[in-house]
Image (cartoon, helix red, strand yellow):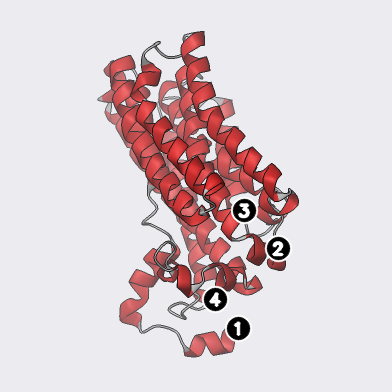
Amino acid sequence: MSETLQEGRAAPPGKRLSAFVSLAKLSFFDYYLSAFVVWTMLPPGTRDDPVTVWTLAVLTLGWVGVCAATVAFDDVTGFRDGSDQFNYDPEQKQLRSRKRKPLLDGRLTEREAVRFGYAALLTGLVWLGLAVLTSPHRPVWVLLLTVFLVFISVQYSYGLRLSYRGGQELVLLLSTGLVVLIPYGLTHGELTGIVALEAYLFGLWSLLVSVYSNINDVDGDRAAGRRNLAIMLPAPVYRGVIAVLSLSETAVIVLACALGAVPWWFGFFLAPLVAVRVVQMATGLVRHDPLKARKLGGQAHRLGVVLIIVANLFAV
């Protein structure tokens, strides 16, 4: 669709705000729950420290900006190459709403989406910079990881287009896990076993939503030139990869308990999450319903956050 045609279908000014909210995917707030996870991992004596609370709050604003830029640029790329038009079939609206893609129905123009992406990125960088400058700790490894996180996130489908070059799954795992590791480093200053566990889980929970989406989107992504594991691997092998990733969740929890990174009883708090994961695997891998499995993955992510927050409050 040309820019000119899309300009003619642009939404009235009064509806632009809701369109930009859709473009920023603010309904997917899972990443921003990392602040609560990190807060519960901190020693009780530091949780009420105003500087600590300030750092977590400002970092969250930074994540919102960077994430909004990332998904806006992803929508622009998906609109340009036609993959979103193909993958967001109106017949699947009960499980995947096209309302989340304001470029598809002309509520926003491509130019507006690109401008929004850069504005969101700039805003996010300002907040992240402010959080780093005023944080209780500033270890070098955290600063490097912050730069790395912003770089790979923005380049996900734009610029280097890492998700089109075989890096989709790794970027999702790292970018989501780092929003736990970085704020912990800025507020606590050290790398511990519990944050390593929960950073991996947080990243994995996000990935175990996307990998099922990719099963559904394989034809549209292949036509658009995207190269992810769903496209590069034979279908049975790809399902095996999803199974291994799902089982790694339980494995790392057990390993963390065995190594003393968390108390021995920590895993019992997460047992309901493991049960949901089994249902998700059965839905997506056995009954071949990837969009329902994707929805279960989102529910599992939010359930996992609640369970891990409660477990942290007892463990720390």
Q: Nearer the viewer, mark 4 or mark 2?
A: 2
Q: Closer to the camera, 39 or 176?
A: 176
Badge 2 amino acid: Arg
The tag earlier along the polypeptide, 2 or 3, is 3
227 versus 33 height, above or below: below
Which residue position holds label 4? 111
For the residues bearing labels 1 and 2, Cβ distance under 8 angstroms:
no
Answer with mark 1 or mark 2, whichever residue precedes in sequence. Answer: 1
- Left or right: where 10 falls relative to 44: right
Q: Which residue is mark 3?
A: 156
First along the sequence among labels 1 and 4: 1
Q: From this view, report whether residue 40 is shown above or below residue 78.
A: above
Between residue 150 and residue 84, name the one nearer to us: 84
Task: Identify the image quadrant of the N terminus.
Answer: bottom right
Mark 3 residue crowding within 10 angstroms, few (<14) / some (14–19) / many (20+): many
**Image mark for residue 1:** 1
